[in-house]
Amino acid sequence: MFRILFLLICLLGNSSISRAQNQTVPPDSSRNKSYRYEETMPVFPGGPSALLKFLSDSMRYPKSALRDQVQGKVFISFLVNPEGRTTDIKVKQGVRADLDAEALRVAQRLTRIQWQPGTQNRRPVTVSYTVPLTFSINNGPGGLAADSLDQLSIPTFLLPVATWTASRGPLPADKGLIYGSCIQRLGFSSGGLPQHVLLVNLTTYKILRLIVKPTMKSRKENEFCVTLPAGSYALYQYYYSYGNDELRKPTNQAGPIAATRYILTVQAGQLNYVGTWDFSVPQQPSFRPDETALQERINPTYRKLGFADAVLAVPK
């Protein structure tokens, strides 16, 4: 969810135009004659607006820059030679490596284009250009700060994370068990439809589907207990019976993902208590510890798990 602005500046003062060599000095009789000097700039097929569209349509904001909320202008320079081909493309003034690389990638596409070359006195010449490509981050839904998760593509079909059953044995060494409860949006009016939360692993950017209200359960609050690979996760979206919410923090603070999303960390080989997730109020999720009440409900079922040794991992 971002806007990439594009400004094209043709720096005529810095234009490099090849000139005729060994010009003949006119005889004295020519001093009374007038000479007309003509110069034209190269023309991109379709004109300046087509050049703008060609470059801006192919730009992709690097996820690392979105994550760090980095913006700025990358100045690209290049030559259009007498044959109308783009050569010598390079970064003249950069911002940082990821933005510079993306701007250079986009500019390299100009090598495919046949320009109408620039001329001097009707002779084709080489002209130098400097183009600033501006990376600018728009706000996300509701005026909240955008981040790299806004660029994720959600698979059409996503299997849910399997529920950890009471009969299971020891935890896998590379995973942690998370447990908590969810207060759903619609209460009894939700019927038997399931509800779930999408989580994003912040190392692999893999999307996981966590069921927080099982099928055929209409009560207001439900428990969940699943295992996840160790690591940090961002809460991405909440899907209830008739819609979905973006899970974002209420402030418009720019910065890393932790400034815009709720984050939880899963420790390997541990029970991780993630609290009560309250989605009852639209666009106002809350996450709070209420472990005592939850343990009273689930201890009879999960007797093999040592809830007293669980670590606190409520999303922040």
Image: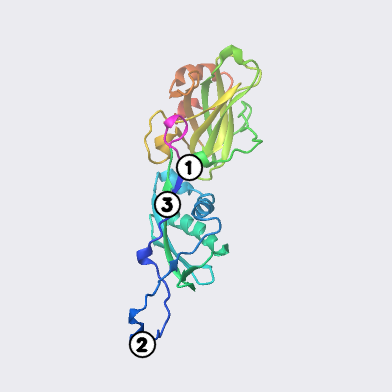
Element type where label 2 sits in the image: loop
The stretch drawn in magenta includes residue 69: no
Specify whether residue 304 is in view. no
To which residue does mark 1 refer?
Answer: 148
Mark before the other along the chain sequence, 3 or 2 = 3
**Mark 3 neighbour class, 10 Å CA radius: few under 14, some 14 to 19, many 20 or more:** few
Say left or right for 218 vs 236.
right
Q: Which residue is mark 3?
A: 7
| Vertical side of 172 occupied by 74: above or below | below
- Position of 204 with respect to 30 (left or right) is right
Three-letter amino acid code of the residue under disc 2: Pro
The foreground one among 221 and 253 is: 253
* Part of the protein shown in magenta: 139-148
Residue occupying image coordinates x 43% and y 57%: 100
Q: Quadrant of residue 162?
A: top right
Look at the numbered disc 1 and give the secondary structure of its residue.
helix
